[in-house]
């Protein structure tokens, strides 16, 4: 259970940083009516997970308390403003994950994006396999709802599944992709802490 909790906390922190220009319902919302979006820290929440790999088996990796209620990440996530990109920084993640380098850029549609962020050797916590790991590659977009609210979607590609006990189940799709739908509320304004 501890491995699941740690894995979930990391994945959620990572996902928060890696976002796509979609709301929880799939609608884009890049318009702010309150002035320019500034850098700052956000409390991110995972609202929904779509797992096309293991019939929902990876959902708990990103929503460790279950998928009925949105899951707030345990750490605040810094998001750069449009005037601060491109921004290259390291996202601190909880064990069993490692810190991750990230390049956030403008996406050309009034939001932000990060492409190809990598997290190798993540313990997936799949049922029936205590040691199945995979490499995660994340593509993220951030859409601004207002100066204090964002929505994010992250496409996580799981690849190079491996297990010392040979217990990794084959994924249901190739590529194996998970979509994370998130929202975030500003906690403060400021440069990268």
Image (cartoon, rainbow, N blue to C red):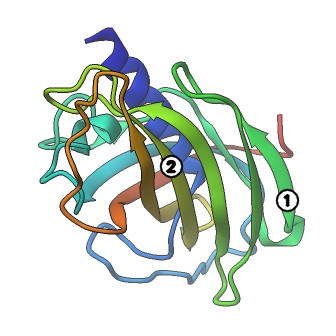
Residue 87 circle label: 1
Residue 139, image x and y in percent?
A: 56, 65
User: In the image, is residue 190 above or below residue 35?
Assistant: above
User: In the image, is residue 110 above or below residue 15?
Assistant: below
- Classify 10 Å Cα crowding around label 1: few (below 14), some (14-19), many (20 and above): some
Identify the secondary structure beneath mark 2: strand
Residue in view at x 56 percent, y 65 percent: 140
**Residue in front for this viewpoint, 119 or 61:** 119
Q: Nearer the viewer, mark 2 or mark 1?
A: 2
Q: Considering the image in quadrants, where does the C terminus appear?
A: top right
Residue in view at x 64 percent, y 77 percent: 111
- Classify 10 Å Cα crowding around label 2: few (below 14), some (14-19), many (20 and above): many
User: In the image, is residue 35 above or below residue 182?
Assistant: below
Residue in view at x 29 percent, y 22 percent: 165
- Side of 11 relative to 32 (left or right): left
Residue 14 circle label: none
Q: Dividing the picture into quarters, in which one does residue 161 lie?
A: top left
Q: CA distance from mark 2 to mark 1?
A: 21 Å
Find the residue positioned furthest to the bottom.
Answer: 109
Residue 185 visible in image: no
Residue in view at x 44 percent, y 59 percent: 157
Q: Dividing the picture into quarters, in which one does residue 78 lie?
A: top right
Q: From the image, tell me which residue sits under label 2.
A: 136
**Residue in front for this viewpoint, 28 or 33:** 28
Identify the secondary structure beneath mark 1: strand
Residue 137, image x and y in percent?
A: 55, 56
Find the residue positioned furthest to the top.
Answer: 2
């Amino acid at each position: 259970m501890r491995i699941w909790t740690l894995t979930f906390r990391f994945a959620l922190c990572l996902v928060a940083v890696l976002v796509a220009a979609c709301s929880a319902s799939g609608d884009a919302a890049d318009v702010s009516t309150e002035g320019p979006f500034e850098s700052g820290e956000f409390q991110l929440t995972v609202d929904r997970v779509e797992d096309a790999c293991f019939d929902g088996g990876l959902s708990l990796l990103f929503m460790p308390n279950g998928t009925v209620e949105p899951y707030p990440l345990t750490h605040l996530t810094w998001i750069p403003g449009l005037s601060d990109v491109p921004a290259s920084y390291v996202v601190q993640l909880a064990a069993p994950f490692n810190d991750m380098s990230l390049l956030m850029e403008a996406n050309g549609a009034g939001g932000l994006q990060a492409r190809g962020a990598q997290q190798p050797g993540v313990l997936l916590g799949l049922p029936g396999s205590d040691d199945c790991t995979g490499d995660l590659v994340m593509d993220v977009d951030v859409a601004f709802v207002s100066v204090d609210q964002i929505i994010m979607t992250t496409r996580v590609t799981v690849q190079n599944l491996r297990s010392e006990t040979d217990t990794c189940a084959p994924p249901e799709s190739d590529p194996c992709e998970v979509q994370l739908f998130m929202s975030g509320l500003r906690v403060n304004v400021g440069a990268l802490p």
